[in-house]
Amino acid sequence: MSLNFQSILIVTYGRSGSTLLQGILNNIDGVLVRGENNNFIYGLYEAYKKLIDVSSHKDTSQPNHSWYGGGEIDLELFLNDCREMVRNVLLANSNDDKNVLCYGFKEIRYFEVYQQTKDITDYLNFLGKIFPKPAFIFNTRNLDDVLKSGWWAKMNTESRTRLIELEIAFQAYIETHQTNSFMVSYEDVVCQLNNFKLLFDFLGAAYPENMDEILLTPHGYGQKNIQANQNFTLKLTPASLYHHLFVVCEIDNVPKRILPSQEFNLAGVVIPANNQMFVSGIYIMSSGKIVRAELGLNSPVYGKKYTQILASNNARFKFHNLIFPKSENLHLFVEINDCQKVEIATLYIDFSQ
């Protein structure tokens, strides 16, 4: 497939899952989407607006005029310089130029832009002037989850209203720029819903065959989904992939060391998201064989914390007397309602250490 655009701009706010989307898009051949740049291009936009104002002055050809030369400012020359500079900043390495068919960046500071101006249309239109054939991808997330995440949890109660207003501004822009605008949510991405797949059609790119693997790759900062021990690594699947299924999914009891042909235990807690779901099985796949955990063990602390979920009182699980004679990669799964299976972790055992 040939790409429909020559640049991609991810327009969003903080804690929306935009780094994950950025990482996914960078798996498309010929696409380079950089991360945040502290909104430095907004400074160029403000300079452009000032130059428009200066160039509007008439009869400035005389050297004794207070706006001498203002009317001769070449705005298109300024835009050309912006195009070249921004491209050079984003590509960074000129040796890769020939391989980059589509470039851009993601930025979360549109929230700040909207708070200053109560409008994002003019700024987005400016970006459309300095990026070639741009695609604007608006990235959103369930606001209940956003407002519990990162710095938002410390913000005042007006944050929700302001984020809603920003999302309305996103939608308004899309309605007037339908040919090069697309809205996708974090939930669309992690659940691989149809709207997320349509994003690739919009871009003119094939949907990656290794999407499951891409989604399992940690994105962003402060990732804590890998526990490294003496001779094994426990890599936890990002909770974003199954947060709609569980309110708690933890492996909290692991050995300090695993030795060949010696028994060890592994335990944790899994609590379904609602009372219509139940955990029907937790198991490890090892050399094509299934090893099941004991379910329904007492979990009084979680029972008190999640009183609305009936299963929370007996939500612990435990693998008893596990034993492996050789190095292995073990995949841990949770089965929901006797049908849906979700991988929650991978245990990498290396007896060569």
Image (cartoon, rainbow, N blue to C red):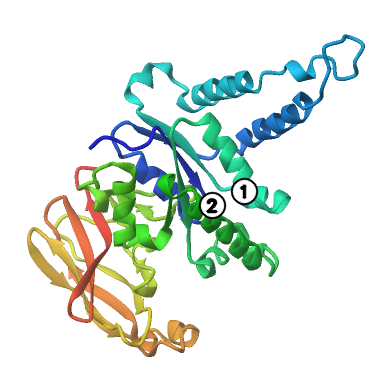
Work out which quarter of the rendered image holds the C terminus and state it.
top left
Give residue 260's position: percent from left, percent from top. Answer: 16, 55
In the rendered structure, which disc, 2 or 1, sits on the residue that comes first in sequence?
A: 1
Q: Is residue 318 above or below residue 71?
A: below
Q: Is residue 246 left or right of residue 106?
A: left
**Residue that mark 2 sits on:** 173
Q: Amino acid at mark 1?
A: Ile
Q: Residue at x 31, y 40 (%)?
A: 27
Closer to the camera in the image, 71 or 25: 71
**Residue that mark 1 sits on:** 120
Q: Is residue 313 above or below residue 345?
A: below
Q: Residue at x 62, y 41 (%)?
A: 123
Closer to the camera in the image, 255 or 126: 126
Front position among marks 2 and 1: 2
Q: CA distance from mark 2 to mark 1?
A: 8 Å
Residue 37 shows in this picture: no
Give residue 168's position: percent from left, percent from top. Answer: 57, 61
Q: Is residue 55 left or right of residue 271?
A: right
Q: Is residue 44 left or right of residue 138?
A: right
Give residue 89's position: percent from left, percent from top. Answer: 53, 25
Q: Is residue 351 above or below residue 171?
A: above
Q: Which mark is residue 235?
A: none
Label 1 environment density (alpha carbons within 10 Å; few <14, some 14–19, many ≥20): some
Give residue 31's position: percent from left, percent from top. Answer: 35, 34
SS label for mark 2: helix
Question: Based on the displayed image, in which of its 4 quarters is residue 40 positioned?
Answer: top right
Q: Residue at x 25, y 57 (%)?
A: 346
